[in-house]
Amino acid sequence: MAKVSEVSPRIYHYTNEQGLYGILGNKCLWATHYKFLNDYSEIVLFRNKLIEFLYPSTLNYFKALIPKYPNAPAVISANGGLDAVVKHELENFVDSSYDATGHEIYITSFTGEHSDPFINENGLLSQWRAYGVDGGFAIVFNTQELEAMLALEHDCFHYDNILIADVVYSDDEEKYKSELSESLHKISVCQKNLFEHILQGRHEQPDNLVEAYEPFVSCITRWKHHGFKEEQEFRIVSMPTVLNREYKETAGENHCNSKPEKKREFRDRNGKRTPYIELFRSLDTPLPIEKIIVGPHKDKDIRAARLRVELRNTDIKVITVSEIPYQ
């Protein structure tokens, strides 16, 4: 899979005025807990797709196992037949995989560059509309430099996983097959090994089960309904480690003390106390901002003038105003 910077050299983060000045002042981006996004169901949207993908090979796998276990036909019959057993086991496996993430998934969203230069220069109308009468701003990041900062962030704190990737939309079968098939194959292999352990009465987990974790996370966090396709979304997915007692006993104190745990912050969002984490703040490195686009607003020229004054002594030299009319 190509690096994000090879697909979109610049990515755009839309925010309101308060968000803009928070990003500039704190030199960080916020990643919001996925259950507090406008549509948190998108993370679990891939559940049924994954079950659908795994079903044919799992069905064949169970059929091959039946002759090896004399009591298998009776057990299968008592549980509603082979189809019901396979679906039940798949649902347990997929739901357990979701639980293994600890549901500690934080998202920062961007849009990618468009083929239309006007959109790249003036922003995406649907995104401007999302910020309503108060107007918005698009912060344009150099993607390659953002990837480098993400690697530093990973080195500084305990993360189970942290990645930047583009979204795979649900109607893009070609991209689904080309970019997710390898991950899906790894999940399938680990799933069959797990079933075999269970059938053999072995209580320890298969050694390769951990190999399914990152592919699983990549799939569930990149899949999105095609109704949002216009956005051409890219996202940073952050999964900070929970350094609880159980984890420390498994990983060892020395490992846990090697880096600090990422602090969870809270803010009020739409009347809800919302968990988030701050990316890059501790790096004390300027964010790789190439320019800021001031969105449609009755005072957009005044906003741009104020920004140019405030940022005159920084590396951010390009402040533009969207030509899309204010409505």
Image: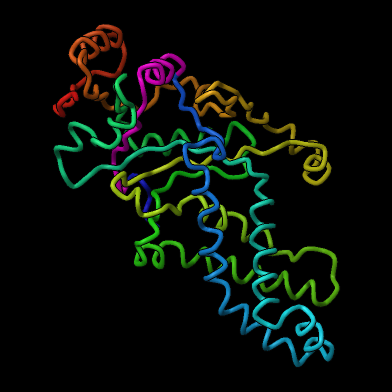
Residue at figure coordinates x 45%, y 33% from the top left: 149
Q: Nearer the viewer, residue 143 or 323?
A: 323
Q: Nearer the viewer, residue 164 or 273?
A: 273
- Residue 96 vs residue 138: left or right? right
Q: In the rendered structure, does residue 18 fall within the stretch colored magenta?
A: yes
Please state, as top left, top right, bottom left or bottom right, where the N terminus lies in the image: bottom left
Please state, as top left, top right, bottom left or bottom right, where the C terminus lies in the image: top left
Q: In the rendered structure, does residue 53 fall within the stretch colored magenta?
A: no
Q: Quadrant of residue 174?
A: bottom left
Q: Nearer the viewer, residue 88 or 311?
A: 88
x and y, in percent, of residue 214 in the image: 58, 54
- Residue 173 vs residue 116: left or right? right
Q: Is residue 187 above or below residue 253?
A: below
x and y, in percent, of residue 79 in the image: 76, 78
x and y, in percent, of residue 142 in the image: 32, 34
Colour treatment of the image: rainbow
Residue range highlighted in magenta:
6-26
Residue at figure coordinates x 61%, y 84% from the top left: 60
Q: Nearer the viewer, residue 234 or 322?
A: 322
- Residue 154 vs residue 164: left or right? right
Q: Quadrant of residue 131?
A: top left
- Counting the numbered discs, the total is 0
x and y, in percent, of residue 192 in the image: 67, 73
Residue at figure coordinates x 54%, y 35% from the top left: 36
Residue at figure coordinates x 29%, y 11% from the top left: 311
